[in-house]
Structures are given as C-alpha cells and as structure tokens.
Image (tube, rainbow, N blue to C red):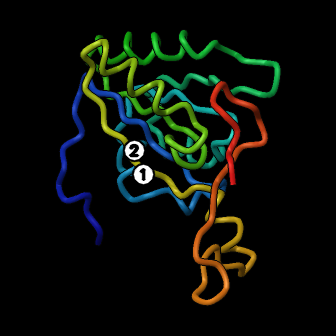
Amino acid sequence: MLHSHNRPVERGKVYLVGAGPGDPELITVRGLTLLRQAEVVVYDRLVHPALLDEVPATAERIYVGKTPGRHVLPQEAIQELLIDRARRNLIVVRLKGGDPFVFGRGGEEARALAQAGIPFEVVPGVTSAIAVPAYAGIPVTQRGVACSFAVVTGHRCDLEALAL
C-alpha cells in the first residue's frame, strides 16, 4: 500500500491540490489523502464530481468555478476565503483542475497565502497539456522527432507574447 511518506495533514494550512486532467483516477496519492481528510474544499469547474465523493460528508464544499466572462467569486475573494478558513484552524484543500501552477492561478493563491502568513503546500497534478497527448498515444517529446514542447494559453496576458 502506498503512503504519503507519513507526512501529517496539518490544521490551519491550505493545500493547493491539482485534481488532474479530468479522469478522477489520475489524482495523485497525496491529493487523494488530503481530500479524504479535508474540512473545507474549495473547488473549480474542471474538477471531476467523483472526487468530491472522497471528501468527508461533514466537510464544507465551496464551488468557485469560473467560465469565460462569469466568475462565481473574484480571485481576490477566493484568496480571502482560503485565508479565512485556514485562520479558523481548519484543513483546507483548494482543489484545482489539472495542476495548480499551470494556468490555474495557483501562484496568485500561494503568494496571497504567504503574504498573510498562512502555511500552505502545493500538490502538483497531472496537467492536460501532457495527459491529453499521452491518452491519444502522442509523445510530447521523442528522440529524433521532438526535442521540446511549450505550453501556451489561448488567452492574452499582460506579458509579451511568446516569441519563437
């Protein structure tokens, strides 16, 4: 049986957990362990509903999903929510589709938590940028064919566009 190296789950801490690319079986062992002990789960639109079945019935579930042009809560309010629940000494899981640091605003949330003095842990997830090609049998790198790959978004950001 796999164990998460016996790392304790701590109260008053936020866990930024990647849910994986949509298939609920692709969440990490650490992510599943945290979900099963969560007292609060703040989750996104891209999280498979079956993962919420792993959360204790007594846990608070808060949906903060975003669709283009429609946000249930603005990003700043999500960050305040995470800070508030951690300050209440709860085990808080911020469950995000894919990986929290790949187009998931996990970096913004981590920065807000650090600035507020809230301990947090990032639990990487399988990003769809790798999973989708793999499921289709397409390697993203292959000796003699493709020596690198890039992950870009179809949305503009405030930074300069990718220059190739």
Residue at the spot of label 1: 32
Please tell me whether mark 2 sits on a helix, a strand or a loop: helix
Up the image or down, 159 lies above or below 9; here it is above
Q: Is residue 14 left or right of residue 43?
A: left
Residue found at the very far right of the displayed protein: 69
**Which is more toward the observer, 55 or 155?**
155
Crowding at label 2, few (<14), some or many (≥20) Cα neighbours within 10 Å?
some
Quarter of the view holding residue 36: top left
Up the image or down, 78 lies above or below 3; here it is above
Residue 59: give x, y in percent of width and height: 44, 27
Residue 101: give x, y in percent of width and height: 50, 41
Q: Is residue 96 left or right of residue 133?
A: left
Residue at the spot of label 2: 36
**Which is more toward the observer, 10 or 127?**
127
Up the image or down, 92 lies above or below 88; here it is below
The residue that appears at 54% across and 11% down in the rendered structure is: 76
Please tell me whether mark 1 sits on a helix, a strand or a loop: helix
Three-letter amino acid code at disc 1? Leu
**Which is more toward the observer, 14 or 136?**
136
Quadrant in which the N terminus appears = bottom left
Up the image or down, 38 lies above or below 5; here it is above
**Which is more toward the observer, 65 or 129?**
129
Three-letter amino acid code at disc 2? Arg
Residue 65: give x, y in percent of width and height: 68, 27
The residue that appears at 24% across and 39% down in the rendered structure is: 9
Quadrant in which the C terminus appears = bottom right
Crowding at label 1, few (<14), some or many (≥20) Cα neighbours within 10 Å?
many
**Contact, mark 1 vs mark 2 (Cβ under 8 Å):** yes
Residue 55: give x, y in percent of width and height: 47, 39
- Mark 1 or 2, closer to the camera: 1
The residue that appears at 65% across and 57% down in the rendered structure is: 128
